Amino acid sequence: MNFEVATGSEIEDEYHNFDALNIPLHHPARDMQDTFWLKNVAGKLLRTHTSAIQVRYMKEHGAPCKIIAPGKVFRNEATDRTHETQFHQLEGLVVGKNISLAHLKYTLDECLKKIFGEDVVMRLRPGYFAFVEPGVEIDMQCSRCKGDGCASCKFNGWIEILGAGMVHPKVLEAGKIHPEHYSGFAFGIGIDRIAMIKYGIDDVRSLYNGDLRLVSQF
């Protein structure tokens, strides 16, 4: 689909991780992201998402652009079966003339079919993310029960798979792109979560405990 791969540093500054993504100081969205701040280095942190790459790329390359940004991210939260302090994310960004939610839906539908098979069924629900408007949550029909409900999908027939939406005008402006001339969409997929669903891994911590019997399967 002609996406370019963009990368960035795991150590990021506060502006590109938060402010440029429409998450200013005291914004309630910052409460969702418990952050690892670097000691004795003002304004530096371990990135909480790969979205910071978006703004840096837009400022450097302008529009139109079409990138995916894979990388490790960090959240200062308690670990359990489905949460880790480190995990991998794949961010996607498309900016151009007359980009719409329909382009986003088509792209994600094609992506999920390549990962999970042609019979995958997905749905869009309204969701909130500070850097997109409107924002959507993407659910995939459970591949094990086909929507009937089972333990894997907590008996509701659907599995939340990723977040996405249309790039907020303030984020385009931070990337030096005029929001009246261009529009875009963005999405973020948790790679670890995709692996857990696809391969039936029941504990995300298994991916990081160094057991080669697990990771050598892939």
Image (spheres, grey):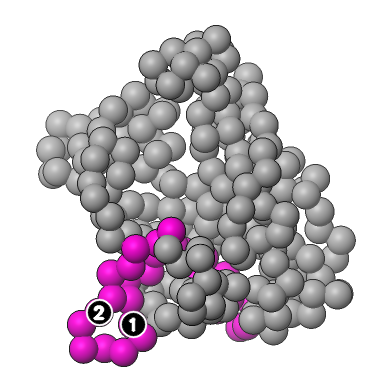
- Along the line of sight, which residue is nearer the eye, 162 or 25? 25
Q: Are marks 2 and 1 in contact (CB under 8 Å)?
A: yes
Q: Is residue 20 above or below residue 103?
A: below
SS at badge 2: loop
Of callouts 2 and 1, which one flags the residue occurring earlier in the amino acid sequence?
2
Residue 53: within the magenta? Answer: yes
Residue type at mark 1 is Lys
Q: Is residue 93 above or below residue 192?
A: below
Q: Position of residue 164 (x, y in %)?
A: 62, 51
Residue 61 seen in the figure: no
Identity, as a three-letter code, of the amino acid under mark 2: Leu
Residue numbers of the magenta segment: 32-61
Dot 1: element: strand
**Spatial distance from mark 2 to mark 1, Cα to Cα?**
6 Å
Q: Which residue is located at x 80 percent, y 45 percent?
A: 102
Q: Which mark is residue 44?
A: 1
Residue 33 in picture, x, y percent from top left: 40, 62
Q: Nearer the viewer, residue 145 or 62?
A: 145
* Residue at position x 73%, y 72% in the image: 169
Compared with residue 37, is residue 203 higher up or lower down, i.e. above or below?
above
Q: From this viewpoint, is residue 213 visible?
A: yes
Q: Residue at x 31, y 38 (%)?
A: 82
Q: Is residue 118 left or right of residue 23?
A: right
The residue at which mark 2 appears reads as 38
Q: What label sits on residue 58 in the rendered view?
A: none
Residue count near mark 1 (Cα–Cα under 10 Å), binned few <14, some 14–19, many ≥20? some
Where's residue 31, x and y in %?
42, 63
> Which residue is located at x 40 percent, y 39 percent?
193
Q: Is residue 70 magenta?
A: no
Residue 144, percent across and down? 47, 14
Q: For mark 2, does the 10 Å Cα neighbourhood hold few (<14), some (14 to 19), or many (20 or more) residues?
A: few
